[in-house]
Image (cartoon, helix red, strand yellow):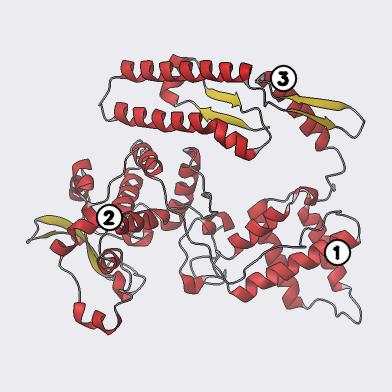
Amino acid sequence: MFYFRWRVQAELQSTLGLKEIRVSLRTSSLLVAKSRANQWFDFVNHAKLMKNAYQFSEISRNDYIQIMKKKITELQSKNIKERDFDYSTELIRKTLPDGTVLEFDYGGDVEKESKAEKLYDSSRNSNSSLSNMLFSELFELFLEHKKKQTKPNKPLSLKMQKAYSLYARTIIDMIGDVDIGLIKKTDIEDLLEDYKKLPKRNLKGYKKLSVLELLEMEIDEEHLVSDKTVREVFVFLQGLFFFANSKEYLQKQLMVGLNVNFSERTNYGRYEDFEVMEILLNVNKQKNIARKWICWIAAFSGARRGEIIQLRKQDIKLDEKTQRSYFLITDEAGSVKTKNAIRKVLIHNRLIDEGFLSYVESKQERLFDEVNAETFTKWFSDFRDSLGIEKYNDYRERRVFHSFRHTFINKSLGQQNQPDKVQQVVGHEKSKLGITKNYVGRYDLYQLLDVVDCISYSS
């Protein structure tokens, strides 16, 4: 069955006497569930809007509480009426291995449904869908089998043994050391998609990082694992699960019918406006103020993580013509991705209003000397998750720190700014200009005002 669940905002929990709202959607159909949950999705957006209004002192705390109380009461009352008169509710029966029949009553009785759900889950977890063999255990048996192969198949070479061991460790880092009976085809497809986003592990800067940290990073395209490596991982999994089937450790055929494109790389996804607002408002509460400014700069400039973290006090300058402050992103401060990454980027007025220039004045040399790029990536991943913002969007695109850059570019192009102007601001090569690009040169800052100033986020 599908449920709608929402954790009540912390500042309202004691006043409303609720820690979370949990509502049965009374259906096992995802399509029907989404339709029935629409009013609750609208409610969440409304709740975030009210929270922002309260935090920006547009409404009082008392008004905030009363508005939320009224909205919750209205929706709960409406849900009861819909439940009483909804004749399309479903009754699903599940038969357990011992012959017991469980009924899932979609009448809205959350307590009753929860008990039935737990009972079914506990029984399901003890039945034959589990193989009682962990992924690591299967791999050890498979590796021993490959070492002892005789003609016509040769024993696995030492080089391939090391490669298989690396693949297995990486996969366990991704999905956990789970019972192989719980692995689904979609898990394999997601795993292979994630594998394409990993860097070559022998390159400097990646060796000491965990797989989960690497999946949150912006990896240069030339550093990514090759298509050949991804194909080898696919072949490894084919052999592993064929072995499991042949030994009857696993009943289902996981690798049959998989649709895998070994060369296509999934893009990063962008954040929705309300998600950016959620990040920026909550990062303001962080004791480490450097984290706040790194996130705000990314959202309002589209700059890369490394470009921001290496900024120095002397890189914040004033443009005489526009009388606007700007960042000078240069290879003197640290490494830059390409020659196009050396550029001037106007500082958005929202950053100035927030007090960024005062922060700059308080620093001696580097603006974020206490921040390590890799640990910041891990922190941001955990921070995003704590806000309930999904790592993947509906198109299975990853949303990581680098997604601020995608969000900025998408919004600026959406305001009809010239692509080559946007490319200059974010440090991309000016494309689709042919030989003309040799004559265009760089735009002055006053010509780029609209590219930056058009960026705004609303709840």
Q: Judging from the image, what secondary structure is the residue with disc 1 in? A: helix
Quadrant position of the C terminus in the picture: top left
* Residue 142 occupies quadrant: bottom right
| Disc nearest the viewer among 3 and 2 | 2
Q: Which residue is mark 1?
A: 243
Q: Earlier in the sequence, mark 1 or mark 3?
A: 3
Q: Is residue 323 left or right of residue 381?
A: left
CA gap between label 1 and label 3 equals 43 Å
Give me the residue at 47% from left, 65% from top: 219
Depth check: give the residue in front, 307 or 394.
394
Q: Earlier in the sequence, mark 3 or mark 2?
A: 3
Looking at the picture, how far across and down is residue 10, in whole percent? Answer: 44, 25
In the image, which disc is placed on residue 415? 2
| Viewer can see residue 364 | no
CA gap between label 1 and label 2 equals 55 Å
- Amino acid type of disc 3? Lys
Depth check: give the residue in front, 314 or 112.
112
Q: Residues within 10 Å of mark 3 (few under 14, many from 20)?
A: few
